[in-house]
């Protein structure tokens, strides 16, 4: 966490907007709507130049310029002016870990043309020595001999005096003709490169290039550059080099000098060799452009934390909030019900593995299938480090086995050893736990190698030594393995309810008790009060509204199993296996439209998601080896269950059971996010109901007119009719305006009380009475200013599926206000004054109109 005493640019609250397909000018038109909603900071996807037609902006080709597809500098200035006019700022996503391995990337193209002699060679993380000083390019649909036999490689020269290009389909690669100018000229004019003379000439020219062409499907075994996970056309950067940092950050640092830019969100910080050193450089650079007493830009990092993991002591303000999202989801999980659902799923699929076991095995599979070359790279450096620390040369195969076992059993994304720094107590413990789990899987010699590897990871290190080389390589390796093994494999067949199968989730221990929530939020108040409190992101497997609906299944696992049994009578012998069928049923009821009806568009979305999920699960089909017949069976299952009247009726019935409890969970989450320590972050479109699945489904553009029209129908803040309106909106919950109204009121409270939520203390409030296990209450306080969050949980059990948890069903349940008992409060969601009876808040009275409350203290 940053400890500098200079003030930071305040975020207040953020709204995440995907700019691709929208641009700066259109984003400016969203600003008035966001301001009315109560948002204080527009948080956008990357703005530097990405590949042509990029759908997301993370495939950067030139970090030194704005993306022309988003607009010009004048267009960006127009957006900033609109934000300033509404008292708002801009938070920008940056991508320091990787760039596109594309000829559109001028730095990468220069490296392809000139190899290690390129002035940009040091920018990219390439193991030159592993491929005879060449870049291995996995771009062919087959091996190079077959491609040449088919005449698919040709040398061209677009115009006289221009450089030569190697053409393969639509791909055109730069060519260094040094020494081969005459041959290149002949080949550029050749009509048939399959003829033996031309073929030999082309082979000669290819052999002299600074790259080697290989089959894209062989990339895991052949590629010698660090990829972003397993994506061949995203190449890692060497941000540990200050010169690389300087050239790739000059634009964003220039923009940060503008006080209208709140700061940056750092994408995939775990991919960097030394995150602490990088973030120190970034902090210094951003602080260096603030002059004349200006506030400092904020830095947020995309970092997935385990429940017992703390953010390292980096000079940042917090994370982007995955841990918060799953903490809130867990609050709505019934522990016993989730266990029962897990047992039923295990029986139906004959798979009783824990999620941790699934994840470990999936990480092993990822290493073997996606990262064998990277494992070799890391192991070779570890072998060298082990040898330098001992008198004997270790067996490289034993070291590789030890490295793989340690990696697949590591319970976190990575450790954070720094140059010339001792291993931290936390990292020491993580390594010990991973090694203990790995030993049972290793032969005796491999266990000895494991001990030697541990000695390197925990031993002395310096920048020039082989120890740091090995440690740095391993620490960059493990996040990719976790991402592909856990996020992109195990979470798609989690063996438990899908509500908790998401980024940062804990499927083996899904439920969060109120006491655990209070402990986590108290810790957040102390250490990460400026981190984002998000519920949905562009990386979510399911949006928060979907998770809120699916969480309700944990309250009625027996009813869910009965519904599944009925569906299995009709579809249990269909093509997909039992795990995929159950995944399909659960996905359907989670994403079922709030309008109650389905259409062809919904069916298509489900079909596309099931195919993607099955490819990610890698059991019956995969991205590398898609099984089109199996995938068609998945599509047929979705079509049949949603078209066939009896099946559709079963699914609609389950969906109806989830409706009101799911709505309550979502509204409770909105209030929790607003009052909890941290910065509320709203994902695009998530002010109304947002029932989305993993990307690309969750990246559908914001329908601004629809959302603006809904907002325009709500009563003005302070309108005395708001209490009556709240009842009406809850009755008409299907249109989503009740969620929008709760969000707007909550964000306006945040905006009106900035100090309270930026630095206010956190205090759990005691709950008494017969329904005490169904209520969570806490207070924020800053001097005379105070706010109280009061939300329900597990309301299907309390109120059933046909009613909301409001009014007399709360019976004798009450909140102890302690030292806040003398205050007068107003519910910001309804405008109703709340009275205390002997220092107690009667829940039945407070939750008489809405099932959630946000109470704000009033001046005496």
Image (tube, grey):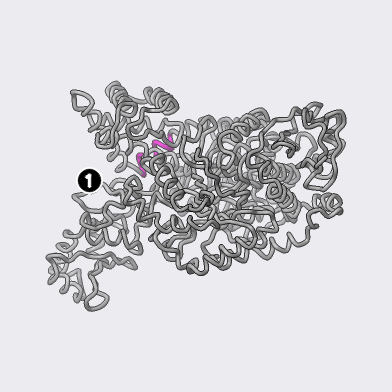
Q: Left or right? Give the position of 47 relative to 688.
A: left
Q: How many marks?
A: 1
Residue drawn at point x = 30 percent, y = 38 percent = 378
Q: Position of residue 630 (x, y in %)?
A: 48, 50
Relative depth, front residue between 596 and 356: 356
Q: Name the quadrant of the C terminus.
A: top right
Residue furthest bottom in the image = 160
Q: Left or right? Give the position of 146 relative to 14.
A: left
Q: Which residues are magenta?
A: 361-370
Residue drawn at point x = 64 percent, y = 56 percent = 685
Q: Which of the 4 image quadrants contains residue 184? A: bottom left
Which residue carries the number 1 mark?
Answer: 130
Q: Which of the 4 image quadrants contains residue 676? A: top right
Q: Position of residue 162 (x, y in %)?
A: 24, 74
Q: Which of the 4 image quadrants contains residue 549? A: top right
Relative depth, front residue between 187 and 146: 187
Q: Position of residue 320 (x, y in %)?
A: 54, 45
Residue drawn at point x = 28 percent, y = 64 percent = 173
Residue furthest front in the image = 292
Residue drawn at point x = 60 percent, y = 52 percent = 638
Q: Left or right? Give the position of 555 relative to 54.
A: right
Relative depth, front residue between 777 and 751: 751
Q: Position of residue 289 (x, y in %)?
A: 45, 53
Badge 1 local density, few (<14 within 10 Å), some, or many (20+)?
Answer: some
**Image position of 458 with respect to 491: above or below:** above
Q: Circle 1 — which element?
A: helix
Q: Main secondary structure of the magenta part?
A: helix
Asked whether 85 falls inside the magenta stretch, the response is no
The answer to whether residue 652 of the structure is visible from this angle is: no
């Amino acid at each position: 966490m940053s400890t500098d005493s200079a003030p930071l640019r305040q975020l207040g609250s953020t709204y995440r907007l995907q700019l691709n397909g929208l641009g700066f000018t259109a984003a400016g038109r969203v600003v008035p709507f966001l301001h009315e909603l109560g948002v204080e900071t527009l948080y956008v996807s990357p703005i530097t130049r990405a590949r042509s037609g990029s759908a997301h902006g993370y495939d950067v080709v030139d970090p030194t310029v704005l993306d022309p597809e988003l607009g010009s500098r004048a267009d960006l200035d127009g957006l900033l002016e609109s934000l300033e006019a509404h008292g708002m700022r801009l938070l920008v996503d940056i991508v320091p870990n990787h760039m596109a391995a594309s000829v559109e990337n001028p730095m990468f193209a220069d490296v392809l043309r000139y190899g290690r002699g390129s002035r940009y060679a040091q920018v990219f993380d390439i193991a030159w020595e592993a491929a005879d000083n060449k870049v291995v390019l996995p771009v062919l649909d087959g091996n190079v001999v077959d491609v040449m036999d088919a005449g698919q490689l040709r040398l061209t020269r677009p115009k006289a005096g221009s450089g030569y290009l190697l053409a393969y389909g639509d791909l055109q690669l730069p060519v260094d003709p040094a020494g081969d100018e005459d041959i290149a000229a002949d080949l550029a004019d050749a009509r048939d490169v399959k003829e033996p003379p031309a073929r030999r000439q082309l082979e000669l020219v290819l052999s002299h290039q600074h790259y080697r062409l290989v089959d894209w499907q062989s990339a895991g075994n052949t590629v010698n550059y660090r990829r972003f996970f397993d994506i061949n056309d995203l190449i890692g950067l060497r941000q540990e080099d200050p010169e690389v940092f300087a050239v790739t950050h000059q634009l964003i640092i220039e923009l940060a000098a503008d006080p209208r830019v709140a700061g940056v969100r750092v994408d995939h910080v775990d991919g960097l060799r030394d995150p602490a050193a990088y973030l120190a450089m970034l902090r210094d650079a951003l602080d260096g452009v603030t002059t004349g007493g200006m506030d400092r830009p904020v830095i947020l990092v995309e970092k997935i934390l385990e429940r017992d993991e703390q953010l390292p002591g980096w000079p940042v303000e917090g994370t982007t909030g995955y841990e918060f999202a799953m903490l809130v989801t867990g609050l709505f999980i019934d522990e016993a019900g989730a266990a029962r659902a897990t047992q039923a799923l295990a029986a139906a699929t004959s798979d009783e593995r824990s999620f941790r076991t699934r994840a470990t095995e999936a990480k092993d599979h990822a290493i073997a299938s996606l990262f064998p070359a990277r494992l070799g790279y890391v192991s070779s450096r570890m072998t060298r480090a082990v040898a330098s620390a001992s008198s004997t040369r270790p067996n490289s195969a034993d070291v590789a086995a030890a490295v793989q076992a340690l990696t697949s059993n590591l319970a976190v994304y990575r450790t954070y050893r720094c140059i010339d720094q001792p291993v931290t107590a936390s990292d020491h413990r993580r390594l010990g736990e991973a090694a203990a789990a790995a030993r049972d899987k290793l032969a005796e010699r491999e266990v000895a190698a494991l001990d030697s590897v541990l000695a390197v990871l925990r031993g002395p290190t310096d920048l020039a030594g082989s120890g740091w080389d090995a440690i740095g390589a391993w620490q960059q390796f493990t996040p990719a393995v976790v991402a592909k093994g856990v996020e992109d494999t195990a979470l798609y067949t989690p063996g438990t309810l899908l509500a908790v199968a998401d980024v940062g989730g804990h499927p083996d221990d899904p439920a969060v008790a109120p006491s655990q929530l209070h402990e986590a939020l108290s810790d957040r108040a102390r250490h990460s009060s400026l981190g984002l409190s998000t519920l949905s992101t562009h990386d979510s497997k399911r949006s928060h509204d979907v998770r809120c609906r699916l969480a309700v299944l944990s309250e009625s696992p027996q009813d869910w199993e009965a519904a599944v049994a009925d569906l299995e009578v009709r579809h249990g012998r269909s093509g997909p296996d039992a795990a995929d069928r159950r995944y399909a049923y659960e996905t359907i009821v989670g994403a079922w439209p709030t309008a109650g009806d389905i259409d062809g568009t919904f069916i298509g979305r489900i079909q596309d998601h099931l195919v993607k999920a099955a490819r990610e699960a890698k059991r019956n089909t995969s991205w590398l080896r898609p099984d089109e017949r199996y995938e068609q069976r998945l599509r047929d299952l979705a079509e049949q269950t949603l078209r066939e009247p009896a099946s559709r009726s079963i699914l609609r019935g389950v969906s109806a059971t989830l409706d009101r409890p799911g709505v309550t969970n979502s509204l409770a989450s909105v209030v929790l996010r607003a009052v909890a320590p941290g910065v509320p972050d709203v994902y695009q479109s998530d002010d109304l109901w947002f029932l989305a699945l993993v990307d690309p489904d969750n990246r559908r553009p914001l329908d601004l007119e629809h959302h603006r029209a809904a907002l325009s129908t709500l009563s003005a803040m302070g309108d005395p009719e708001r209490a009556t309106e709240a009842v009406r909106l809850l009755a008409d919950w299907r249109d989503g305006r009740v969620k929008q109204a709760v969000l707007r009121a909550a964000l306006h409270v945040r905006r009106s009380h900035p100090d309270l939520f930026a630095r206010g203390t956190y205090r759990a409030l005691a709950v008494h009475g017969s329904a005490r296990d169904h209520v969570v209450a806490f207070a924020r306080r800053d001097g005379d200013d105070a706010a109280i969050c009061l939300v329900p949980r597990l309301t299907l059990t309390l109120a059933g599926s046909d009613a909301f948890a409001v009014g007399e069903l709360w019976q004798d349940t009450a909140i102890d206000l302690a030292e806040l008992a003398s205050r007068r409060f107003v519910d910001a969601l309804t405008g109703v004054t709340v009275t205390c009876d002997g220092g107690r808040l009667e829940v039945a009275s407070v939750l008489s109109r809405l099932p959630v409350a946000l109470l704000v203290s009033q001046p005496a």
